[in-house]
């Protein structure tokens, strides 16, 4: 597609699997896991969630833009993929936590857990935990075994709006920059709002989508903006800078860092740099993040994220939190995550539930007549990279 006056960026660079994105996902996941097990080991590991948000925006926008460009975008298919990707492993984790908690938690804590489940299922747990936690960084683990699902709530709420926005921009805006400008404006507005809210209402900035949306929009802009991809030494240097920004955030941030707000720019811009420079296959950081151990950890990262926090919460509830317990939780999170990915996540994600009629033109899906101007049924092949922490 010509770049002088393009209609929409053609995502040819994402037409094949990029293992470095799984590697980046692994880095983010390990940061969160270590931080939650013992924050003293990695005081800023919580920024891994922000890296996940950037990855998610990058991949989701690439999927939608590709399908819009090909005339195969579908709201129905998009949500079908998200549900099969997220819900089965999430439901399995919730059921296991409820079963274990029945024997472990005291009645009033079990009642609180039941209330949490009612918010987790409709992807509203971030709002529930905002109402019930005074400080995310200093709440006790045993009070909220499902506290980590707040990030799923933020992402799912973003997914409800973003596909419709891109579909509307594609239909009603005919030039590239007229489509990109609203995303840039929303990015700046969300970042500015986050910067203002952090010192005044820090928990609102932490838990609510309007103050987190800029992180996912940054990933979307890294995917959709037509910018020349640096090559050679410049590519390597920018990639290393991006990786360094994430590692520095994990090492030097702490619970006392005002967050998210402008502080979150350091890990988020670092993630965007890695995603952008990694589009060139010879990028040094792409080769590093594409090594097999990192890729495997990235593949199981969603399930590891689901299981690690309940293990920590219930362990804190039942026994002294010794270093042996910490080591067992670390290994159990990885093993449980692998088993969940292997036997729950993958089978449901790759399942083909019934026959699906395919539509060749934009806007012909009768199942979603109210959204008919925004989508048509897509191909049944899922995007090979998938999407993170969803």
Image (cartoon, rainbow, N blue to C red):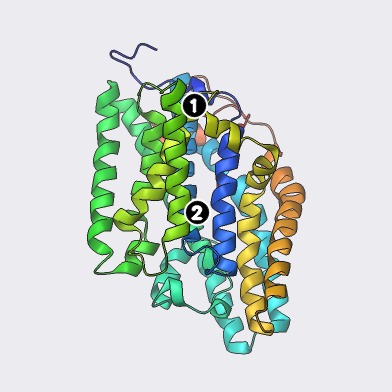
> Is 286 placed left or right of 240 in the picture?
right
Given residues 354 and 221, the one toward you in this image is 221
Expressed as whole percent of the image width and height from the top left, the position of residue 140 reads 52, 79
If you read the primary sequence from the N terminus, does the residue marked by circle 1 or circle 2 appear first?
2
Expressed as whole percent of the image width and height from the top left, the position of residue 177 reads 26, 25
CA gap, disc 1 and disc 2? 21 Å
Given residues 22 and 122, the one toward you in this image is 22
The residue to which callout 1 is attached is 279
Q: In this view, which residue lies farthest toward the bottom?
A: 107
Expressed as whole percent of the image width and height from the top left, the position of residue 286 reads 55, 32
Mark 1 lies on a secondary structure that is loop
Residue 182 — which label? none
Q: Quadrant of the N terminus?
A: top left
Quick one: label 2, few (<14), some, or many (20+) residues within 10 Å?
many
Q: Decide: marks 1, 2 in contact (CB < 8 A)?
A: no
Mark 2 lies on a secondary structure that is helix
Residue at point 46% right, 37% down? 240
Above or below residue 21? Residue 233 is above
Above or below residue 263? Residue 63 is above
Q: Is residue 83 visible?
A: no
Count numbered badges in the picture. 2
Above or below residue 99? Residue 247 is above
Say which quarter of the image contains residue 82: top right
Residue at point 50% right, 67% down? 119
Expressed as whole percent of the image width and height from the top left, the position of residue 261 reads 31, 57
Above or below residue 71? Residue 346 is below
Quick one: label 1, few (<14), some, or many (20+) residues within 10 Å?
many
Residue at point 73% right, 82% down? 103
Q: Is residue 326 visible?
A: yes
The residue to which callout 2 is attached is 48
Given residues 241 and 221, the one toward you in this image is 241
> Is 144 placed left or right of 277 in the picture?
right
């Amino acid at each position: 597609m010509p770049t002088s006056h393009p209609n929409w960026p053609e995502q040819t660079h994402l037409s094949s699997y990029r293992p470095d994105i799984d590697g980046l996902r692994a880095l983010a996941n390990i940061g969160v896991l270590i931080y939650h097990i013992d924050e003293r080991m990695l005081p800023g590991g919580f920024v891994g969630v922000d890296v996940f948000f950037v990855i998610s925006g990058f991949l989701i926008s690439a999927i939608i833009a590709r399908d819009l460009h090909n005339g195969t975008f579908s709201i129905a298919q998009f949500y079908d993929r998200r549900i099969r990707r997220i819900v089965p492993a999430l439901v399995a984790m919730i059921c296991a936590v409820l079963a274990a908690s029945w024997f472990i938690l005291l009645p009033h804590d079990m009642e609180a857990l039941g209330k949490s489940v009612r918010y987790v299922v409709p992807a509203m747990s971030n709002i529930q935990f905002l109402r019930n936690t005074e400080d995310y960084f200093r709440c006790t683990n045993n009070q909220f075994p499902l506290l980590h699902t707040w990030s799923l709530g933020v992402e799912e709420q973003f997914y409800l709006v973003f596909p419709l926005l891109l579909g509307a921009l594609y239909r009603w805006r005919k030039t590239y920059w007229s489509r990109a400008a609203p995303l840039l404006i929303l990015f700046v507005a969300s970042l500015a709002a986050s910067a203002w809210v952090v010192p005044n209402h820090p928990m609102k900035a932490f838990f609510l989508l309007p103050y987190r949306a800029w992180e996912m929009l940054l990933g979307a802009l890294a995917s959709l903006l037509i910018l020349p991809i640096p090559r050679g030494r410049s590519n390597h240097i920018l990639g290393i800078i991006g990786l360094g920004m994430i590692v520095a955030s994990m090492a030097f941030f702490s619970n006392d860092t005002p967050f998210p707000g402008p502080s979150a720019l350091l890990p988020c811009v670092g993630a965007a740099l890695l995603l952008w420079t990694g589009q060139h296959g010879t990028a040094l950081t792409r080769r590093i993040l594409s090594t097999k151990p990192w890729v495997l950890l990235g593949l199981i990262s969603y399930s590891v994220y689901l299981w690690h926090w309940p293990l920590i919460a219930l362990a804190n509830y039942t026994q002294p939190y010794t270093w042996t317990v910490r080591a067992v939780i670390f290994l159990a999170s990885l093993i449980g995550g692998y088993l969940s990915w292997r036997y729950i996540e993958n089978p449901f994600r790759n399942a083909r539930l019934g026959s699906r009629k395919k539509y060749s033109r934009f806007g012909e899906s009768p199942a979603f007549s109210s959204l008919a101007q925004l989508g048509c049924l897509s191909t049944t092949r899922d995007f090979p990279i998938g999407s993170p922490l969803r």
